[in-house]
Amino acid sequence: MGGVSSSRLARLVKERGLATLPTQAELRQLKAAGAKPELLQILSSGNLQSAKIGPPIPENLLQAAVETEQERLHDAELHLHDTVSAD
């Protein structure tokens, strides 16, 4: 996922927690983007260091993750630009 393995992401989430917990829809989108079962299980189990369920992950960012997994890097770059510009 974005050049970082799911196992590394899972380890980081386990160590550091999350700022917000992902919704079920976001977990499905992460799975579609290539997240492995280990990462999805940790994300869905929550973490004592994690905060509450917060605002949704921006749609353009999720789309960029899917496009990166599909090696459609130009499209991903455009979605990332849109995400950054929206802030």
Image: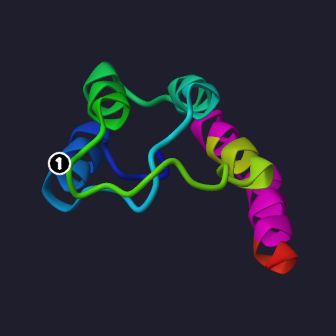
Q: From the viewer's side, name the closer residue of 36 and 77.
A: 36
How far across and how far down the image is residue 3, in percent? 42, 52
Residue tagged 1: 14
Regarding residue 43, the answer to whether it shows in the image is yes
Q: From the viewer's side, name the closer residue of 6 and 21.
A: 21
Residue farthest to the front, as pictured: 52
How far across and how far down the image is residue 7, in percent? 22, 39
Quarter-wise, where is residue 39 in the image?
Answer: top left
Regarding residue 72, the answer to whether it shows in the image is no
Q: From the viewer's side, name the closer residue of 19 and 61.
A: 19
Query: Considering the numbered disc 1 on the image, is that residue within a helix, a strand or a loop?
Result: helix
As shown in the figure, which amino acid type bears the numbered disc 1? Lys
How far across and how far down the image is residue 77, in percent? 75, 62
The answer to whether 39 appears left or right of 63 in the picture is left
Q: From the viewer's side, name the closer residue of 16 and 80.
A: 16
Residue sitting at 65 percent across and 55 percent down?
55
Asked if the stretch drawn in magenta spans residue 77, the answer is yes
Label 1 crowd (10 A; few <14 / some 14-19 / many >=20): some
Instruction: Give the overall secondary structure of the magenta segment.
Output: helix
The answer to whether 36 appears left or right of 68 in the picture is left
How far across and how far down the image is residue 24, in percent? 56, 25
Tell me where the magenta segment starts and ends, as one range.
Answer: 66-83
